[in-house]
Amino acid sequence: MRITVFRRLMADEFGATRAEMLAKDHVLSGLDGRTVEEALEAGVPAKEIWKQVCTEFEVPVERR
């Protein structure tokens, strides 16, 4: 998954402003205690990050 696709999915699910805030501020235990931005910088694949976001925020399966 491309990062641009990931960012679009985040914006579609949470709204652009909230998605940006979540990416910068919310620490995800499934990403070893990193934020989305930290995980992206560390080279974690966007698809894996999206899976963790979906799990953490209980995104319905049809929108994953």
Image (spheres, grey):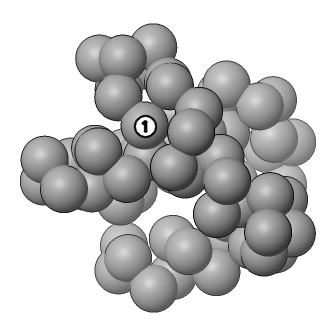
Q: Name the residue under label 1.
A: 35
**Can residue 13 be seen by looking at this rendering?**
no
Residue 33 in picture, x, y percent from top left: 36, 17
* Left or right: 2 in relation to 42: right
Q: Which of the image's four quarters has the C terminus? A: bottom right
Q: Residue at x 27, y 56 (%)?
A: 40
Image coords of residue 49 (percent x, y): 42, 46
Q: In this view, does 9 lie to the left or right of 38?
A: right
Is 37 left, or right, of 23 in this rendering?
left
In the rendered image of this protein, does residue 16 appear above or below residue 49? below
* Quadrant in the picture for the N terminus: bottom left
Residue at position x 67%, y 71% in the image: 9
Residue 36 drawn above or below residue 35: below
Question: In the picture, residue 17 is in which quadrant?
Answer: bottom right
Of all residues, the one furthest to the left in this rendering is: 43
Give the residue displayed 78% in from the left and 75% down from the top: 16
Q: Is residue 30 left or right of residue 58?
A: left
**Which residue occupies 65% across, 28% down?**
55
The image quadrant of residue 48 is: top left
Residue 50 in the image: state x and y as whole percent.
Answer: 52, 50
Residue 39 coordinates in the image, percent (x, y) = 28, 44
Q: Label 1 is placed on what type of residue?
A: Thr
Q: Is residue 38 above or below residue 31?
A: below
> Can residue 64 be seen here?
yes
Neighbour class for label 1 at 10 Å: few (<14), some, many (≥20)?
Answer: many
Count of numbered badges drawn on the protein: 1
Q: Is mark 1 on a helix, strand or loop?
A: loop
Q: Which of 34 and 9 is in front in this view?
A: 34
